[in-house]
């Protein structure tokens, strides 16, 4: 289990992280969200022991993360940290041995990993000759080949096509099943919705929303009604107390309402029309992010 306890980081007078706390249990995938410059990378660097926090501490399975424990952490970032003059095999062997794995075992394992990620043909090719997506796969293998207890994924899917995203997701789920704690950061909210049960939204290093995705959505209050039908009374709907906004989305009306109680008032107005769809749905994480971050910045 990863425990981040009240970490604060100053760069000079700039507070990049402000009293941030969260835990990621074994087998949990946790989302760290925030605008550009919100403090995500700084938080990751503190967790990995690359920089010190000004205040607070980070524990992995109850222990401070030191040189021995960093071997148990895997890290995938958007900026590829590969040694591009090496071949795929040399690169993976280098990382495996660096992380304390047995040399002979690493050599055998590399073949399995390359097969799994369908890049066996590139084994003896230089990293710099590989496409971006294949370089990302090599980086991903480097991060997970020692079966990390903590996996940090900072925009891991950038530049990958949907088939490769699926392949990588499956490998992440496998690690989750083995009990790894996984932290995931992305500006693409669909990935966070898809992956993370719990999350934190950071603004200027400060956590403004935190908890389970389900609770966050429920407590947000605002819901959307998706309505499809003929000659719907848009102006009448707009006048209902509690209706925030009505927009047309792909041939349907999206009606934003203050809370779920307003849904029955909308239904009363439209029930005698020729409607083929009436769904009350939770807001997307994207909507929540934009509203909450916007409110905080006001
Ligand atoms: P992005 O989504 O753009 O990657 P981020 O959430 O990862 O952003 P950080 O890189 O952690 O944000 O930056 C947080 C704050 O700390 C910013 O104000 C940034 O300018 C500042 N900062 C980051 N690294 C340093 C550094 N080495 N020296 C001084 N200030 C820094």
Image: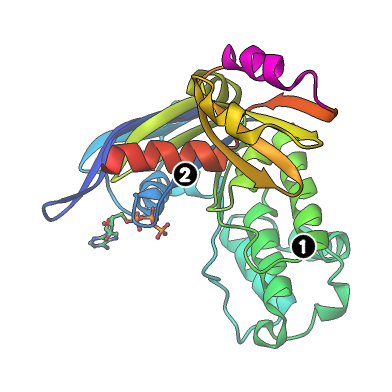
Identify the secondary structure beneath mark 1: helix
Is residue 49 shown left or right of residue 96? left
Which residue carries the number 2 mark?
33
The residue at label 1 has a CB less than 8 Å from ligand 1: no
Is residue 298 shown left or right of residue 137? left
Image-quadrant location for residue 214: top right
Residue 38 location (% of width, % of height): 34, 50
Which residue carries the number 1 mark?
104
Compared with residue 107, is residue 274 higher up or lower down, i.e. above or below?
A: above
Queried whether the magenta region covers residue 71, the answer comes back as no
- Do tag 1 and tag 2 residues touch (Cβ < 8 Å)? no
Separation (CA) of disc 1 from disc 2 = 40 Å
Residue at point 40%, 49% (across, down): 40
Point out the stretch of residues depicted in magenta: 260-273
Quadrant hosting ligand 1:
bottom left
Image-quadrant location for residue 195: top right
Residue at point 41%, 44% (across, down): 47
Q: Work out whether mark 1 precedes mark 2 in sequence or the reverse, and give the earlier one.
A: 2
Image-quadrant location for residue 97: bottom right
């Amino acid at each position: 289990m990863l425990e981040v306890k009240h970490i604060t980081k100053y760069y000079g007078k700039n507070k990049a992280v402000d009293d941030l706390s969260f835990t990621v249990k074994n087998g949990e995938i946790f989302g760290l969200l925030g605008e550009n410059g919100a403090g995500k990378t700084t938080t990751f660097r503190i967790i990995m022991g690359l920089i010190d926090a000004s205040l607070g501490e980070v524990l992995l399975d109850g222990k401070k993360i030191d040189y021995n424990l960093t071997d148990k952490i895997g890290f995938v970032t958007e900026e590829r940290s590969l040694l591009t003059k090496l071949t795929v095999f040399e690169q993976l062997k280098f990382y495996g041995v660096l992380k304390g794995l047995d040399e002979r075992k690493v050599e055998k394992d590399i073949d399995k990993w390359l097969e799994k990620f369908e890049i066996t043909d590139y084994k003896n090719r230089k990293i710099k000759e590989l496409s971006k997506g294949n370089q990302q796969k090599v980086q991903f293998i480097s991060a997970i080949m020692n079966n990390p207890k903590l996996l940090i994924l900072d925009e891991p899917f950038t530049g990958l096509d949907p088939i490769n995203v699926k392949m990588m997701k499956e490998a992440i789920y496998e690690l989750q099943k083995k009990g790894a704690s996984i932290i995931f950061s992305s500006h693409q909210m669909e990935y966070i919705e898809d992956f993370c049960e719990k999350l934190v939204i950071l603004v200027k290093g400060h956590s403004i929303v935190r908890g389970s995705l389900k609770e966050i959505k429920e407590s947000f209050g605002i819901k959307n009604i998706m309505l499809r039908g003929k000659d719907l009374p848009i102006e009448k709907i707009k006048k209902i107390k509690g209706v925030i906004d009505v927009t047309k989305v792909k041939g349907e009306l999206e009606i934003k309402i203050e809370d779920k109680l307003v849904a029955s008032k909308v239904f009363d107005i439209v029930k005698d029309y020729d409607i083929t769809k009436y769904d009350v749905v939770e807001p997307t994480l994207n909507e929540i992010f934009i509203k909450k971050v916007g409110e905080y910045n006001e």
